[in-house]
Amino acid sequence: MHSRSHAKKLAVVLLLSGSFPSAVMLNGQDLPPVNYDESRVPHYTLPDLLVMSDGRRVTTAEQWQKERRPEILKLFEKYVYGRTPSKPVRVEWTLVESSDEALQGKAIRKQLVGRFPEFPNAPEFDLLVYLPKSDRPVPVFIGLNFQGNHTIHPDPAIRVTRSWVRNNPQLGVTNNRASEASRGAMASRWPVEYILGRGYGVATMYYGDIDPDYDDGFQNGIHPLFYEPGQTRPKEDEWGSIGAWAWGLQRALDYLVSDPNVDPRRICLMGHSRLGKTALWAGAQDERFALVVSNNSGCGGAALSRREFGETVKRINTSFPHWFNDVFPAFNDRVNELPVDQHMLVALIAPRPVLICSAEEDLWADPRGEFLSALHADPVYRLLGTDGLAVREMPGLKQFIASRISYHIRPGKHDVTPYDWQVYLDFADLHLRPDSSRKE
Ligand code: GCU
């Protein structure tokens, strides 16, 4: 087994360099050149969503729900993201700050801290919630953020994260501690006033509160809270960081469904990039998320692994060995033998609305592979009686597809933009806002 921390350092260097060279030595491995040529995508056959591992065909919605869905969930646990340990670990949420006159009187702000009562030295989760003023419970978008809650908006009341943050001189992060300098730095990804203006709340939590995104053999973050006596790292088939981030999202959801100002049936989950992979995995596992948006989630997210276009399973496991479980790398050179591919992850969200978003220049994330996952998840949605994906061919730029599975591609780079939020909210309005509740 290679050293995870060495791989991590290399991954960071490559990330900072902004682009991946076509061939690269990574963690002592000579990786094949990245393929960006559609004509060189290998021939592949996807696992059939509607055939059980024992060969039986799935022909009814009930069979999907009772047998195939749980089977596929287990396959993703076993082969990709890892199993969440069954030990019950409790999070208690405490309101630590609130205002009914936030953002120039436009919003309600609540800040909560999630603590582990059985583990006083464990990490703490900071949850930031903005809600539009309304006399009825409102729908909410929840998503993890990359740099700390205080970076999503310049609001001076937002608590600066106390957790480990990757050093970043531009954001004033030194010694892995965030400071005032990064307040509002990521605001372009979180157009809070716009979202509130559309009648939705926004809830966010820093992913590093749950598990800092570097490889330390799972000594920090929440993994150790789940160790059995004598255990020092997750077992081979247990969760990595994505599994932990997804668990943290579910704990934030526990709070949201209990908030009387929030409509528990309209909580939408959104995530970008590695946090888009996380959103899909959390949304797949927890049916309380009413709608899921994956933004530029790529390999290990919405993109089909078998296409090996842009980032591959081998590359992701080499660059980020702490994201998945320790079984996934066994498939680095034989993705065709994986019992799952990522269309099956999208299908686990059925029949709930799911929107897969790509960016034209984000070839690393394989936009076509993301579209194909949406397309191939369609039979499950149809079996469950919804319209699935309304198109068969990949749509052009900026075309909104009005169906239960939707796919959208915009011009530009790997990022979250205010325009993207317009699309997410149009999609959420379409599915979660029957005309009767539009007046809110
Ligand atoms: C890297 C990584 C991707 C990931 C992205 C991100 O590019 O290779 O898999 O989605 O970082 O999270 O920004």
Image (spheres, rainbow, N blue to C red):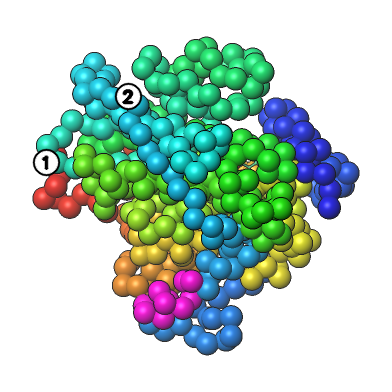
Q: Nearer the viewer, mark 2 or mark 1?
A: 2
Which residue shows up at 72% across the image and 49% down it? 232
Q: Is residue 163 left or right of residue 16?
A: left
- Where is residue 259? Give x, y as percent: 26, 41
Residue 274 appears in view:
no
Residue on which disc 2 sits:
97
User: Quadrant of residue 274 in the image?
Assistant: top right
Magenta span: chief secondary structure: helix
Which residue shows up at 59% across the image and 51% down it? 226
From mark 2 to mark 1, how far is it between C-alphas? 29 Å
Labelled disc at residue 439: 1
- Where is residue 131? Give x, y as percent: 26, 32
Q: Which of 142 and 199 lies nearest the eye of the viewer?
A: 142
Disc 1 residue type? Lys
Q: Earlier in the sequence, mark 2 or mark 1?
A: 2
Which residue shows up at 49% across the image and 34% down it? 124
Q: Is residue 301 left or right of residue 399?
A: right
Residue 384 appears in view:
yes
Decide: is 125 above or below 223: above
Decide: is 247 above or below 142: below
The local crowd at label 1, few if under 14, some if 14 to 19, many if 20 or more residues have their Cα within 10 Å, is few
Q: Which of 365 and 283 lies nearest the eye of the viewer?
A: 283
User: Quadrant of residue 153 in the image?
Assistant: top left
Disc 2 residue type? Glu
Q: Quadrant of the C terminus?
A: top left
Residue range in magenta is 61-70
Decide: is 350 above or below 212: below
What secondary structure is marked by label 1?
Answer: loop
Whether label 2 touches label 1, CB < 8 Å: no
- Answer whether residue 377 is magenta in the image: no
